[in-house]
Image (tube, rainbow, N blue to C red):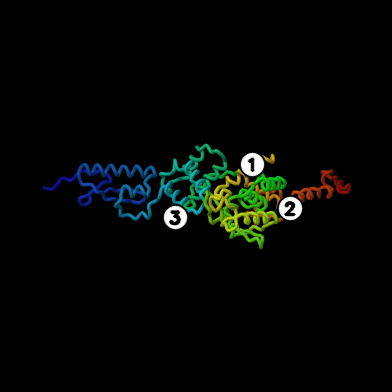
Amino acid sequence: MARKPMDMPAGVESVGQRLRIRFTWRKVRRCETLPYPQTPKGIAAAASLLDQVKQLNRLGLLTDDKYLELFPNTSYMLGQATPTFGEYAQLWLDSRVIVKNTRDNYKRVLNSYWMQELAGVAVNQVTSLMLRKIVQATAWPSMTDRKFAVNTLSGIYRAAIADGLIGQNPAAAIPRVKVQPPEVDPYLQAEADRIIAHLHATLEGAQRVYAHYFELAYYSGMRPCELLGLARSEVNLERRRVRVCRVMVGGKIHERVKTKYARDVLLNDRALHALEGALAMNEGATYVFKPADGRGEYIASESTPKEYLKAATEALGIRWRPQYAARHTYATICLMAGMTPAFVAKQLGHSVQILLDRYARWIDSDADMLELEKLKSGGIGTVLVQSAPRDQANT
């Protein structure tokens, strides 16, 4: 005797000994065969799954990943499963060739501002509106942090576009804030000379390496991380230059520099004197500045020379500035000596535009006053409005 056909809910149908559901996804009709028997219990399970699919679709949550989770045996080609924002952000971070400090800063802003809301969302489902709400609701500690966080997010989505996961960058719609960079605060040349002289006079034995270290810092403009990563093989005393091509960051040597481009730094007499002294102290060493305690081949922390500088400024009554200010000291000394911005920028590893933006106060300051003097010599300044000639006044 034939079995009586059972009533099926809308969208559920029988196929062979199994059940199938029909629905629309991304404006295309789909059907999926389910491993459910044609029993009241199986039909109820199929109807429940169909309702779940429709609900997810209505909310915009039926992503490729979710579709594969619901229908692991689907015959449709979905391309590749779209990663969540959390998965893709991790992939983006892991693929970048960056030093530990930079990586830690990226991780900080991702975990602090984006992961809580976006980690489980498919990378192609994040919208500009979602990002605006997060930005609006966040109590930013500074505009600098906000700018860095949004730039990081935008970088992730530019990579997602390149990988073919999305068509446009949702972070591009977030307004960028202009952050005024802090003004550089160099040591005066006289202060730098006093500090160097004090270090040479008070440090003894292996500690004298820090006197040579700061003399080179003040008279070469090299960054602290570049000084600590400077190898003997990159020093050419005869040609009076060093090759800056590696840095020490986070206790490790990295074969790259901050700007990603190696450069040659030409040595003045003071810088040459510092290098000769440092090399003579550590003959045969791989790196120019060897730790005074003999532990390791190179000084593995910027905090170590910092303590010597801090002690010197306190002893001399000089206002403390971070050791990075030695780089600013060199830049301002060069500019006030009349060196061209192009040459100074090359020495520092900057673009000329960055140099002009950062050190504008020290460029041609005397020449600027001479330009103002032209106002007087041109008859401008004492008479603001000159009367028109009499014959012109009557016309």
Return the x and y of residue 242 as percentages of the image width and height. 62, 58
State the residue position of label 1. Answer: 311
Return the x and y of residue 323 as percentages of the image width and height. 63, 46
Q: Which one is in front, 391 or 374?
A: 374
Amino acid at the residue labelled 1: Ala
Would you identify the image quadrant in which residue 262 lies? bottom right
User: Most extreme residue toward the left, as rendered?
Assistant: 1
Q: Identify the residue shown where x is 28% and y is 48%.
A: 21
Looking at the rendered structure, the number of numbered marks drawn on it comes to 3
Q: Secondary structure at mark 3?
A: loop
Q: Identify the residue shown where x is 52% and y is 44%.
A: 149
Return the x and y of residue 223 as percentages of the image width and height. 61, 51
Q: Which one is in front, 233 or 374?
A: 233
**Mark 3 neighbour class, 10 Å CA radius: few under 14, some 14 to 19, many 20 or more:** few
Choose mark 2 or mark 3, whichever is in front: 2
Choose mark 1 or mark 3, whichever is in front: 1
